[in-house]
Amino acid sequence: MTTVGQLLLGYVEHHAPTVANPERIAYAIDALTDFWADKTLHEVTPKACRAYIASRKVAPGTVRRELGVLRAALNHGVRQRWIAAAPPVDLPSKPEPKQRWLTRGEAARLLWACRAPDRRHLARLILIQLYTGTRPGAALALRWRAGPEGGWIDVDRGLLFRAAEGARVTKKRKPPAKMPRQLVAHARRWRRDGAAAVISYRGKPVIKVRKSWAAACEAARIEGATPHTLRHTAITWAMQRGAPVIEACGYFGVSQRTMEDVYLHHHPEYMGGVVAAMERKR
């Protein structure tokens, strides 16, 4: 009898190599395996899904993504004709979008906390994200020349290319962005280091900033923030400064619906026409 573990293994072997970010599937499979591996399809029930959710001491969004991978693996098994039908997988409710963003004072304190030599690479990441809203993973992968390793910065033209050459197009769009003049000035100085990666430490590309980020946040007295918070911050600041909404969608790679649901209320003209109409005297 086919087990859930066999279907998970088949999914990661057959499907994961075809996606843009197979690591995300691998992380989910690792989390799912301990609980589901020995279970049969008949044991994939709403009760079992609730038990899995209770067993995971992580954010609701993380559990939802993991169970989404389980659902995808079962459906993949149907398409491959390994099983006749896939049992339904109950997902927890989709969490509300995160609203955390940094004030300018918090951002200044965070950058000040990166003045130490062993955190200067983090300062580069922070500046790139605050000026362009680039996702942390894409920012860390930036190089000074185009290539398959990651996006790149064209200092001469003041352009930031978020996507690597030949990269697969996904829902997480990575459009090129024109860099503000302040960031161009920083980039020109950074390029003199001679490292291949824009964000480097002792000449080597930086892959993760978990420890340095935690230390900087502690030093800056900032709570509830992650590197992804910097993307929210950039988009929020753009709205607060009255950036054209459609242009902002293209610049940050955000859908118009996401912009309206999460960020638009920060815009100075938000619902201004309606308020003016309600205040008008006839």
Image (cartoon, rainbow, N blue to C red):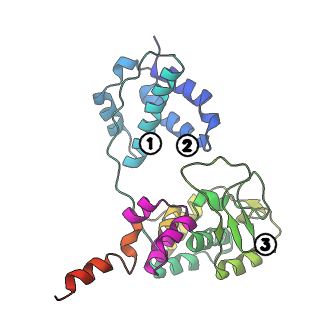
Residue most toward the left?
282
Amino acid type, label 1: Arg
Q: Which residue is mark 3?
A: 191
Q: Is residue 49 above or below residue 20?
A: above
Say whether disc 1 or disc 3 marks the residue closer to the N-terminus.
Answer: 1
Determine whether, in the image, residue 192 is placed left or right of residue 17.
right
Q: Is there a contact, CB below 8 Å, between mark 1 and mark 2?
A: yes
Distance, label 1 to label 3, CA atoms, is 38 Å
Q: For the point 53% across and 71% down, which residue is it?
A: 247
Which stretch appears magenta?
233-262
The N terminus appears in which quarter of the rendering?
top left
- Crowd around label 1: few <14 · some 14–19 · many ≥20 (10 Å): some
Q: Which residue is mark 2?
A: 24
Q: For the point 61% across and 28% down, which residue is it?
A: 13
Distance, label 2 to label 3, CA atoms, is 31 Å
Amino acid type, label 3: Arg
